Image (spheres, rainbow, N blue to C red):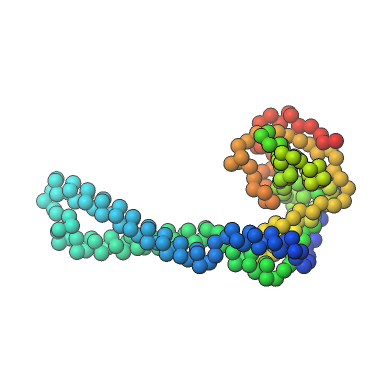
Amino acid sequence: MTETATSSENLRNMTEVEHLFLAQVLTTLPTPQKRHLKAVLNTAVFWVFSLAGFCILWFISSLLISTFTRFDLGISSDYAQVIFPVAILFAAIFSINSTRKWLATSDQSYPLVKADIATQKIMLERYQIDDVKCFKEPEHGGLLYFLLIKHPTTEQQKIRVVYDYESQNDNIDPQALLSISTQVTICSAPKSKLIVDNHFEGELLTNIKHFDLTVAPIHWPKPDSWETVQWQTLEQVYSVNSSCSKSKV
């Protein structure tokens, strides 16, 4: 498990199963029209609440000022002709900026997934696997694999996260469990980068170290993602009792 890792990329035609998978994902994503409609509603809500909040602060401040001084800054004062329009302007600016930030951070995958379905292509990235560690969650017995592979361009090693979803089912089909081999092909949609499959081939790896996954689910890494934790410290991060490791036969 210490061979030099390599990677190559190419495109192939999308299968019917992959097409159906992306089409199902597309139905769960907000369309651009829905995002823009929600943006308009968010702007209106932010504007109303921010203006209301300012008016409450204005009212309290005017009471305090009139109590201790002779100045009247209340709604009935001459200053209100300036204060209120300024409040409307600042509330509008605040609400628009808040909506712009929401648009920038909200899910924008719909047009990308739609473009992938239209092009009908899948990108293949082939890697040689250097090492593997497996973590087992205690409640359902689900398996989480960390694959140590090498970056295709920089030659630096990186860690890939792969979940074995079949392992957490009540009636496990042994044939459906992941069999980790010396090579993996990551199949993804080119534009949206959605992973549609991880295909393992080559010599089967039999001495994979196993650990108990003891951290809360909120701290688990995302499926089909790149792990930033150092390889040597995975046990300390995801398993409190790292001495429970054992080899898979």
36 sits left or right of 46 in the view: right
218 vs 202: above or below = above
Q: Is residue 92 visible?
A: yes
* Residue 7 image offset from top left, x and y in percent: 79, 58
Return the residue found at the far right.
203
Q: Please tell me which residue is depicted at 17% across the width and 55% down the height of the picture.
A: 74
178 vs 98: above or below = above
Q: Nearer the viewer, residue 88 or 167?
A: 167
128 sits left or right of 103 in the view: right
Question: Which image quadrant for residue 15?
Answer: bottom right
Question: Which image quadrant for residue 41?
Answer: bottom left
Q: Is residue 154 visible?
A: no
* Residue 188 image offset from top left, x and y in percent: 72, 60
237 vs 88: above or below = above
Q: Which of the image's four quarters has the C terminus?
A: top right
Q: Please tell me which residue is depicted at 17% across the width and 60% down the height of the picture.
A: 79
